[in-house]
Image (cartoon, rainbow, N blue to C red):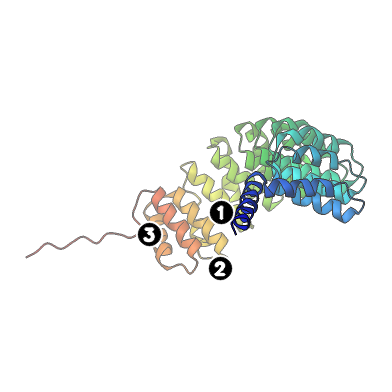
Amino acid sequence: MKKIFWLFLLVVLSGMAISQTTNPAEDQVSVLLTQLSAKEVNARRAAAEQLRTYGSDQRVVPALLKAVDDPSPFVQMAAIDSLGLIRNPAATTKLCEVLASNKNDQIRQSAAIALGYLGDKQSLSSLSKALNDPSDNVKFSAYNSLGHLGAAEAVPALASGLKSEDVRTRRAAISALERISSPTSLEYVRVALADNDEVVLAAAARMVGAFQDTESLPALKKLLDNPAKQVAISAAASLGRLKDGSGLAVAKKIIQEKDPNLRRQAADALGYIGGKESIAILRKVAGEDSDPGVQQAARISLSRLRVPAEEKTPSRGKK
């Protein structure tokens, strides 16, 4: 019996020792790294996708960088996507090379998107060049990634897109510039206030207001008459930020629109315009609007104006 007991104890202790020295995650990485060399494309692709879960393992990024040169474009894209999601800057150089030279549009697009996730400013030059890529998907992904990087150095390259005859390019350019929000873009944004597209105009109107650009006052006042409501309310809000209340009538009208998004923008604009009339409207909206988001926007605007959401009723003194 004693021998059986000691044998049993030895087995248990050996199992404990093995469990303490074996890391399941490391074992899984080893399996996936082996699978990355499998003959079947689907197996290699699956491995490249699953390895993103183990990005902290030092073996993963080098293996994925090697997989970027896999003969299958599906494996290449899976590896590129994983490198972007892991966000290790060690992948920047390789992905820039792919963006510049790979002949497959989808692979170049994957590289442009991944570089945006990486957020490494070393990719600015490559992404800026990709703004002229023959593929629209690659080009627009590059615009988006540059906006995500938020680097003022990208402003001149992005601003060149505002001159394009393609409205999609102008929209992509102004969107990226708005995300970067650098004062160096102001001279280009002023020109965009004369664009004929409502998305570009609305963004440009918001930006000059955020920059407190008094030189844009005349252009903003003209936009109050724009038939596109999002343009008019954006102009009204920016005028309010510039201490000009001439957008009040527009905000009062749009706060009654059926579209809750427009009402939210109007509530925001009233918070910049200020004054007794704006406060009265905001208090009513904060308590009565059917959309919680509009109510919240009204309360935020009232807070910005430093007034309570409800008017205090004077207490009556005791007789």
- What amino acid does circle 1 point to? Ile
Q: Secondary structure at mark 3?
A: helix
Residue at 73 percent across and 48 percent down: it is: 27
Q: CA distance from mark 2 to mark 3?
A: 20 Å
| Relative height, residue 305 to residue 314 (above, below) | above
Q: Amino acid at mark 3?
A: Ala
Between residues 264 and 224, which one lies in front from this camera angle? Answer: 264
**Amino acid type indicated by mark 2:** Lys
Label annotation for residue 233: 1
Crowding at mark 1 (Cα within 10 Å: few <14, some 14-19, many 20+) = many
Measure the C-alpha gap from mark 3 to mark 1: 19 Å
Q: Nearer the viewer, residue 24 or 62?
A: 24
Up the image or down, 122 lies above or below 294; here it is above
N-terminal of the pair, mark 2 or mark 3, is 2
Q: Are marks 2 and 3 in contact (CB under 8 Å)?
A: no
Q: Is residue 274 visible?
A: yes
Mark 2–mark 1 Cα distance, whole angstroms, equals 15 Å
Residue 269 horizontal side relative to residue 29, left or right: left
* Residue under label 3: 280
The earlier-in-sequence mark between 2 and 1 is 1
Q: Position of residue 17 (x, y in %)?
A: 63, 46
SS category of the residue bearing label 2: loop
Describe residue 228's horizontal placement relative to residue 124 as left or right: left
Q: Are marks 2 and 1 in contact (CB under 8 Å)?
A: no
Crowd tier of the residue under label 3, counting other residues whose Cα lies within 10 Å: few below 14, some 14–19, many 20 or above: some
Residue 258: mark: 2
Q: Of label 3 and label 1, which has the lower sequence position?
A: 1
Mark 2: few/some/many CA within 10 Å (<14, 14-19, 20+): few
- Asked if the residue under mark 1 is in contact with the one under mark 3, i.e. CB atoms within 8 Å, the reply is no
Q: Is residue 5 left or right of residue 135?
A: left
Image quadrant in which the C terminus is located:
bottom left
